[in-house]
Amino acid sequence: MANTKSAGKRARQTLKRAARNRSVKTQLRKLQKQIHLAPQRTADQVHAAISAIDKAAKNGVIHRNAANRRKARLNRSLAPAK
């Protein structure tokens, strides 16, 4: 239990933010898994996932470099195999 009123408020905020971040991360994993398991990847699917990744990075849910790495992997999966 928090010792001060402000510490209690910070604890409540942390719980709310953690729940929101968990939801966003779960959604990102679902999008990436759908793309990975799809027999035919479409550009629209990849662009939707990239948009979601950018939003998560902008809001600080995932790190900027992690977002760039995920986007690069998605774009590489869209390119024709050589």
Image (cartoon, rainbow, N blue to C red):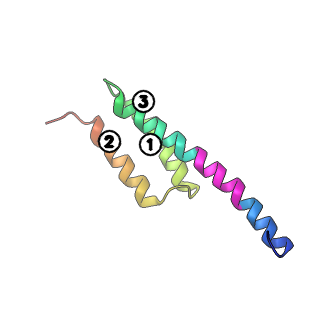
Q: Name the main secondary structure of what is drawn in magenta.
A: helix
Q: Which residue is mark 3?
A: 44
Q: Are marks 3 and 1 in contact (CB under 8 Å)?
A: no
Q: Residues within 10 Å of mark 1 (few under 14, many from 20)?
A: many
Q: Is residue 57 above or below residue 29?
A: below
Residue 77: numbered disc: none
**The residue stretch that appears in magenta:** 14-23
Q: Which residue is mark 2?
A: 75
Mark 1 residue type: Ile
Q: Is residue 9 above or below residue 31?
A: below
Q: Are marks 2 and 1 in contact (CB under 8 Å)?
A: yes
Is 18 inside the magenta-drawn segment?
yes
Q: Residue at x 18, y 35 (%)?
A: 81
Q: Position of residue 22 (x, y in %)?
A: 59, 49
Q: Secondary structure at mark 3?
A: helix
Is 28 inside the magenta-drawn segment?
no
Between the residue at mark 2 and the residue at mark 1, the CA separation in whole angstroms equals 9 Å
Q: Residue at x 59, y 55 (%)?
A: 59
Query: Residue most toward the right?
Result: 5
Where, quadrant-wise, is the C terminus in this rendering?
top left
